[in-house]
Image (tube, grey):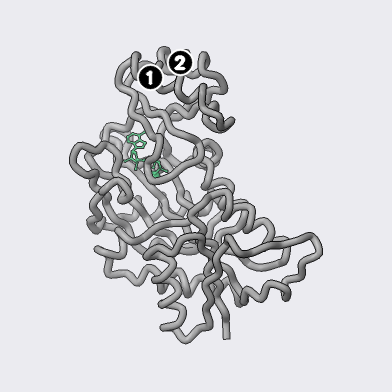
């Protein structure tokens, strides 16, 4: 019997749903707190006894990423793989991978000093969007609409202690309806797609920002793009986010590694955790 291990650092709706679903399917399952695991260069797989397949669900990007490196060192199959987590966890790398794979994505410019970031911003013209290259839930994603604010935000970023804050990711502002599209891709299957409508007085559509979920129709174009984007980053279980540009049509703006699906599960008829658990079993059996 396959044993699934769900690694968490904070138990959310998603981790509980995955654990319950595994038990419901008659599998063995355990939940392990990432904060309690230690690994050494001498460790053996059997020392940890984490079952046959690991679902890495840490909220902290770096904790999840480096713990995954250790677990792969011990030959555990981990969803998602280290390389996938590393690509998806970084918006700059993701944008490069998407562009290289010919997937429509917002035009994004990268600068490596405050001065060159301001040059890019002024040459391109506002509005633009400035994002941290590592981050989620819309944190630090700024719509830049006037030069004064742009200057202040870039100045703030330059004074930040984190070296990552001084890498500038400047994206065209997509002329879109007050929503985006979240696609939940599991392996080579698009399980569900939802619109996320931004809350009142909020430009970002993240559910963490009060965004409201509504079922989205799965068109051939949407399915094709979502599956291509998932494949481009290396596959696994991912959330592919797209925007509907008035001129260009669908563009993929990010691929999420530890995908949240509370919003999607509230409106979708698809069994999202069920699809994820089945996928984990298929990986364990490989
Ligand atoms: N280029 C853009 N044009 C218009 N809206 C955007 C753009 N980039 C991001 N947004 C809005 O901001 C939200 C958060 O941006 P995103 O890149 O997804 O960062 P995060 O990883 O923090 O969710 C998106 O879901 C979307 O609603
Ligand atoms: Mg997002």
Residue 153: quarter of image? top left
**Looking at the rendering, in which quadrant would you find the C terminus?**
bottom right
| Residue 138 place in picture, x, y as percent | 37, 41
Depicted 145 relative to depicted 79: above or below: above
* Left or right position of 206 against 105: left
Contact flag, marks 1 and 2 (Cβ < 8 Å): yes
Residue 167: quarter of image? top right
Ligand 1 within 8 Å of the CB at mark 1 = no
Q: Residue at x 62, y 54 (%)?
A: 82
* Left or right position of 174 against 86: left
Q: Residue at x 55, y 65 (%)?
A: 33
What residue occupies the far left of the structure in this picture?
Answer: 200
Dot label at residue 150:
1
Q: Assign ligand 2 to one image quadrant.
A: top left
Dot label at residue 118:
2
**Looking at the rendering, in which quadrant would you find the N terminus?**
bottom right
Q: Residue at x 53, y 57 (%)?
A: 235
């Amino acid at each position: 019997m396959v044993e699934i291990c769900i690694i968490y650092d904070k138990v959310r709706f998603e981790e509980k749903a995955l654990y319950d679903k595994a038990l419901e399917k008659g599998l063995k399952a355990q939940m392990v707190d990432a904060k309690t695991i230690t690994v050494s260069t001498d460790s053996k797989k059997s020392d940890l006894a984490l079952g046959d397949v690991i679902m890495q669900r840490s909220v902290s990007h770096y904790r999840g990423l480096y713990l995954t490196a250790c677990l792969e060192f011990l030959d555990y199959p981990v969803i998602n793989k280290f390389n996938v987590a590393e690509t998806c966890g970084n918006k700059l790398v993701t944008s490069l991978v998407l562009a290289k794979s010919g997937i429509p994505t917002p035009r994004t410019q990268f600068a490596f000093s405050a001065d060159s970031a301001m040059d890019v911003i002024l040459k391109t013209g506002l509005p633009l969007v400035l994002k941290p290259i590592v981050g989620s839930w819309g944190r630090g994603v700024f719509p830049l609409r006037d030069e004064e604010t742009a200057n202040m935000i870039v100045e703030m970023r330059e004074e930040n202690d984190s070296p990552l804050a001084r890498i500038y990711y400047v994206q065209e502002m997509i002329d879109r309806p007050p929503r985006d599209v979240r696609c939940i891709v599991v392996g080579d299957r698009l399980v569900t797609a939802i619109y996320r409508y931004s809350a009142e007085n909020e430009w970002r559509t993240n559910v963490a920002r009060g965004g409201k979920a509504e079922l989205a129709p799965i068109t051939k174009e949407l399915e094709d793009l979502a599956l291509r984007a998932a494949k481009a980053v290396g596959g696994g279980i991912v959330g592919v986010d797209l925007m509907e540009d008035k001129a260009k049509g669908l563009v993929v703006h990010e691929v999420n590694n530890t995908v949240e699906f509370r919003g999607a599960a509230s409106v979708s008829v698809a069994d999202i955790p069920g699809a994820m658990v089945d996928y984990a079993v298929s990986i364990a059996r490989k």
